[in-house]
Image: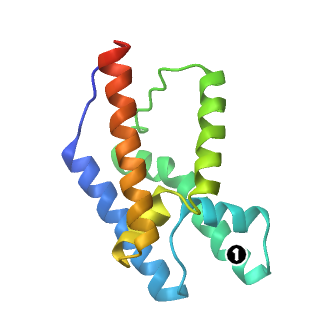
């Protein structure tokens, strides 16, 4: 398995995620955690709370179209696993998000920026788990 690392695309994406987190905190005083935004969209507490979440999710969904308008190409996405594996992975992520009280964007971007001990512990945990998983898949299983 070959991983294509594109530093400029990664840097651009990181800058845009960071700017969006800063703008959301500055404008609404809210933390940019993707699963928290999705949860509040599905189970809204009030209409004001729902509308900014809907706008954020719409922006996420429209991003590929914006990229197409700017570059003339859709982002290349390759998913080298089956639909069943995607469903299992989504379930595992859902359990992790629930047990970890947030997702990678909430803990890794916003929580780390606030020096939250819980977010630091969560980020260290998911980064270590990722490194171990990749090592096992690539070097132990040979995939």
Q: Residue at x 62, y 65 (%)?
A: 36
Q: Position of residue 53 (x, y in %)?
A: 65, 70
Quarter of the view holding residue 74: top left
Quarter of the view holding residue 39: bottom right
Q: Secondary structure at mark 1?
A: helix
Q: Position of residue 47 (x, y in %)?
A: 78, 80
Please identify the quadrant where the C terminus is shown: top left
In this figure, which residue is indicated by the disc labeled 1? 51
- From the viewer's perspective, tell me whether residue 38 is left or right of residue 116: right
How many numbered discs?
Answer: 1
Quarter of the view holding residue 122: bottom left
Against 63, residue 50 (above or below) is below
Q: Residue at x 53, y 57 (%)?
A: 103
Instruction: Identify the colour scheme used.
Output: rainbow
Q: Position of residue 52 (x, y in %)?
A: 63, 75
Q: Give whichever of 125, 12 is nearer the camera.
A: 125
Against 69, residue 21 (above or below) is below
Q: Give whichever of 43, 92 is nearer the camera.
A: 92
Q: Position of residue 138 (x, y in %)?
A: 32, 20
Q: Residue at x 40, y 78 (%)?
A: 22
Q: Give whichever of 101, 55 is nearer the camera.
A: 101
**Outermost residue, top side:** 142
Please identify the quadrant where the N terminus is shown: top left
């Amino acid at each position: 398995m070959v991983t294509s690392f594109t530093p400029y695309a990664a840097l651009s994406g990181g800058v845009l995620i960071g700017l969006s987190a800063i703008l959301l905190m500055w404008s609404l005083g809210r933390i940019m955690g993707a699963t928290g935004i999705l949860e509040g969209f599905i189970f809204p507490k009030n209409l004001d709370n729902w509308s900014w979440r809907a706008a954020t999710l719409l922006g996420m969904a429209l991003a590929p179209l914006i990229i197409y308008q700017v570059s003339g190409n859709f982002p290349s996405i390759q998913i080298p696993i089956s639909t069943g594996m995607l469903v299992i992975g989504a379930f595992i992520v859902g359990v992790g998000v629930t047990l970890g009280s947030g997702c990678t964007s909430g803990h890794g971007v916003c929580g780390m920026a606030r020096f939250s001990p819980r977010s630091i512990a969560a980020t260290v945990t998911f980064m270590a788990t990722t490194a171990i998983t990749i090592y096992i898949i690539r070097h132990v299983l040979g995939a």
